[in-house]
Image (cartoon, rainbow, N blue to C red):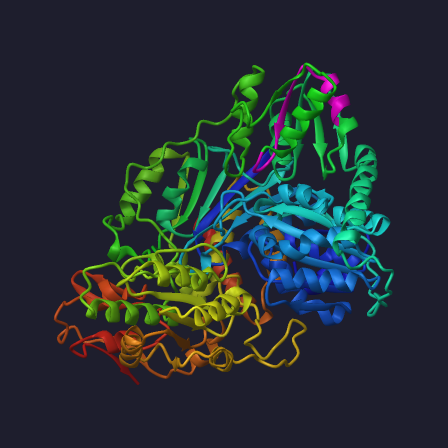
Amino acid sequence: MAYNIYICGIGGQGIIKTSIVIGETALSKDMNVVMSEIHGMSQRGGVVSTELKIGEDQSPIIQEGGADLILSFEPVEALRALHKSNKDSIIVTNVSPVLPSTINQQDVDYPEIDEVIKELETKVKKVFAIDANEIANNAGHPLSMNMAMLGAATAISTFPLDKEEVIEMMKNHLPPKSIEINLVAFEEGYNSCV
Amino acid sequence: MKIKELLNSEKGKKRFMLGNEAAVRGVLEAGVSLAATYPGTPSSEIGDILFKVAKDANVYFEFSSNEKVAIEVAASAASTGLRTFSFMKHVGVNVAADSFMTSAYIGVEGSLLVLVADDPSTFSSQNEQDTRHFARQANIPLFEPSNPQEIKDFIHYAYDISDQFNIPVILRTTTRVSHMRGIVETDEYNKNTKTFGEFKDNGLHVPVPEAARVMHNNLVEKISNIRKISNESPLNKIIDNGADVGIIASGGAYNYVADVIKQNNLKINVLKIGFSHPYPEQLVKQFLEQNKEVLVVEEVDPINEIETLAIAGRYNINTIIHGKKDKTLPETFEYTPDIIFDALQKIISFEDNRHTPNEMSSIQLPSRPATLCSGCPHRASYYAAREAINSLNLDIESIHPSDIGCYTLGIAPPYKMANYLMSMGASVGTSCGFSKSTENQPIISFIGDSTFFHAGIPPLINAVHNKNKFTLVILDNRITAMTGGQTNPGIPIDGMGDDAPAISIEALVKSIGINFVKKVNPLDVKEMIEVYKDALNYDGVSVIIAKYPCNLINKQKIRERKYNIVVDNEKCVHCNICVDKLACPSINEIDGKITIDQVCNKCGVCTQVCPTGAISKKE
């Protein structure tokens, strides 16, 4: 068995980096970990997702309904990931939307955020809706958003890695000058989910 | 994983590695002297890493102008006794095939490994062809790793086979294996690789017909001998669970089999195939005799399955063989744990303990198709082309052969500037066909700079010689953008990171005898439209070189733009040209007002298309 984390959002939000920090932390604790990433056209506005499995599994794809935790960097992407969730899953989602670049050419409007969160809440055990963009901006840089999301993940009771261990690994993976800001974002993300 | 760690990781150290990172570590550990590629996803990261480490690792590395050249560089270098490496995506093998096929006849004095990354489910490709067919056609041994650790380990093994039999070998990955991260234990790595070999004429390097006949016999003999090794290889192993049902699985698909068996405590025997060509006949025969029913699991085509059926037929074994042929498994796309679960349930009965997946939301979700980036020069080229075509007021469709690159996204509305696509360089060759087979339909085709160097030049020579009439737009964004930003022959940097002569597209095109050659900055909308109109009126082959650097390499220049793009909504007359015709992702209409978002790269094209000056640059 494995603890399955599905991480999703948009190209450029730091999803791969966040996933690598989780994977490296698992390895540092001598846990088995596999991960898969889909980012073919991410630089051009597409969806990015990673699947992380910490535990015995060998395959890097989570079964339908098999995610213990969904970490969504964008609210609509959390809805798009629902097929990976079941009634006992936990969803942590950023509430700051990223409008699709082609939204003006589409027949579908971007949905109301409140409706998105309500919908998520009807599907899974618990939804943590946090404004990770605001946390990042307050911390000092919009690009620290991913570390706010990572901090939030470590606050989830089922998350298999300790906060302090994740922080240590995070420090290894960030440029020294940005560590302070990212630490603030991480802590605020954590606090918003305890 | 940091580049330094990849280079300096000690023996026995465990690392969290991407499959493509493990490939680089593998060839370095194996003592490779030379590597050549043309970038192609899902193998692109291998080149990105080699570009950074080649000097420190004492390896010669190049981005060749195409895959055929890459194979030729690696194969000839291997004939001097060196250990060499080439890598490409699956469709790259089509380009390389002419030389690659005969490389097995000629053989290598050193060793040659070619990593080919297939793309089941076509995440970033135009087809999902299976390279394992090619290995059979070319009589080249092929290995199928399932994870990053195996990528690294199999590379050592495959090089040994190449050394022992003087034959090129293929390591076949898939997107899920190349783009999978997992734990890899690194081995010893000695940086003292040989820089030079020596070519010796043994009389067996020139497959003229008489020699080729001898070579083919030798090759068949080699494969027959290698099959004996494949039968006993540790890469092919039976995991005997004392059952009478078995699974033969290879590559990334093996992972799903392993997980489904473990999670459901299933009693099933497994034959894991890692060395799949030549197929381990005796081992498979033994496995068939051991089981009443066998399921063959592989991505994409039923190749191991057909081999297995042939073995059952030859030895008159009655085992029932399931797979794609009897529709137990799908014949297209990559597999998932659920697909394997469902297939197994057709063969044996066991309880479904899986979580019930949530149903999708009833809320309609906007899609996120990939689009050209904000400020992408290709958008400007397409906008102007659409304007020029529309100005002709045609009652017949215009033809827009396109090519492989970011600019294929020109297929999308409102530009609709791609309506015929085949392969690298085909924009030019297919324009030749359209030129001869249509009468009044204007032809404007598009090709990127790297793709032009790759396969666009011979068809352009064809176009001139055969007196064609069409307009070719060479979208010269100074980089191989789609695969992440690699250099190409038009860039003054080579694969070692050294200064290099940059090939002038303009001089090259003129030298063929094309008289209409215009170099334009596509961000100058007015001029661009005029040039298109002139080109459309030209009776012959016209070439427009739309030259402006991709955002990927233009970051400094973008930062230096000391102005912002602003909208004066008082002046806006809601013509929506900026939103509907330019369709830049940074421009949105929100609550009836035009807004510019933060991602804007300030290319300024919108200020030119706005008819009232409502959008402008503000210092």
Residue at position x 61%, y 41% from top? A54
The image quarter containing residue B378 is bottom left
| Residue B496 x/y as whole percent | 68, 73
Quadrant (top left, top right, bottom left, bottom right) of the N terminus of chain B: bottom right
B21 or B121, which lies in front?
Answer: B121
Would residue B403 be counted in the magenta stretch? Answer: no
Residue lying furthest front in this view?
A: B210
Q: Quadrant of the C terminus of chain B?
A: bottom left
Q: Is residue B617 left or right of residue B235?
A: left
Q: Please state the horizontal and vertical placement of residue A80, each as a whole percent of the image.
A: 38, 43
**Residue shown at the point (74%, 60%) measured from the top left:** B75
Residue B204 position (above or below residue B355): below
- The magenta segment is B284-301
Task: From the top left corner, tell me how far across and down residue B15 is, in percent.
Answer: 71, 52
User: Splitting the image into 4 quarters, where does residue B86 fall?
Assistant: bottom right
> On screen, B377 above or below A107?
below
Q: Is residue B287 highlighted in magenta?
A: yes
Left or right, residue B491 beside residue B517: right
Front one among B487 and A87: B487
